[in-house]
Amino acid sequence: MMTLDDDAVIHYLLRHPDFFIRNASRVEQMHIPHPVKGSVSLVEWQLARQRSQISQLEEEITLLMEQAGLNQILFKRLLQLQTELTAANHLQDMIMQLNRWAQSFGVASVNIRLFSDCWKIDALSDLASLALVRDAFEPLRIQRLKHERHYLGSLNDAELSLLLPATRQTGSVALSLLGEDEALGVMIFSSQDHQHYQPGMGTAMLDYLASLLPVLMKRWIELA
């Protein structure tokens, strides 16, 4: 006598798809264990599964629609920002416009640091505070960014002192390398909230800004 197991039953049902039609009256009498109700009919169990699957699909669709709506809003705000940055009269004005825009999202500040080996920055000019020595940044890059373009999370005191010497009470940052093929500097969005920036968050906006800003900055400062 052959012993039936799960695979044998499933194989039989797959080969005989009309089984439930031929045995409809018996199927209606079948009951299966239920963690809350004790037992339910096979039909009721199947309907409950379908309702659960439909509910899950509805949640996913709602999430996609919400995400699409947020992306559309973000896209419009980025276009507005690009217009404002393009109209800036000088580099500090552009950074001020960027900060005003970011603060509307609840961000504390945005800072730009430019690698001194990539840009012609006069040590006596108003832009001297933007200069960052690449060798000093390299340990942070290895520790935080590794081979990525962005880092989202917290920084220790030494790292904050290097990147944001004039900023206090920084809980978390979104750190991005500026430029496309070659890193020309660093863009730092900072928040006082330790949970504001976390690994795994989307970086589409950061990608866009990290590529746009160096193009705009070349109006006022030359590449080395």
Image: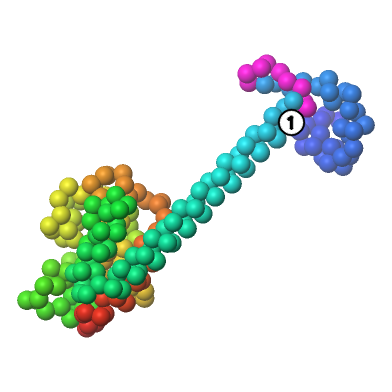
Q: Residue at x 83, y 41 (%)?
A: 14
Callout 1: few (<14), some (14-19), or many (20+) C-alpha neighbours within 10 Å?
few
- The percent position of residue 100, horizontal first and vertical second, equals 25, 59
Amino acid type, callout 1: Gln
> Is residue 23 in the magenta section?
no
Q: Compare residues 16 and 78 and report the one nearer the observer.
A: 78
Which image quadrant: the N terminus? top right
Looking at the image, the residue that sits furthest to the top is 38
Residue at 76%, 33% in the rendered image: 6
Q: Quadrant of residue 141?
A: bottom left
Q: Position of residue 84 (x, y in %)?
A: 31, 68
Q: Which residues are magenta?
A: 35-43
Count the marks: how many? Answer: 1
Percent x, y for residue 108? 23, 52
Nearest the eye: 95 or 196: 95
| Residue that mark 1 sits on | 46
> Foreground residue, 162 or 53?
53
Magenta residue check for 39? yes
Q: Where, by quadrant of the figure, is residue 29 drawn?
A: top right
Q: Tell me if residue 173 can be seen.
A: no
Image colouring = rainbow
Q: Position of residue 87 (x, y in %)?
A: 28, 73
Query: Is residue 25 visible in the rendered structure shown here?
Result: yes
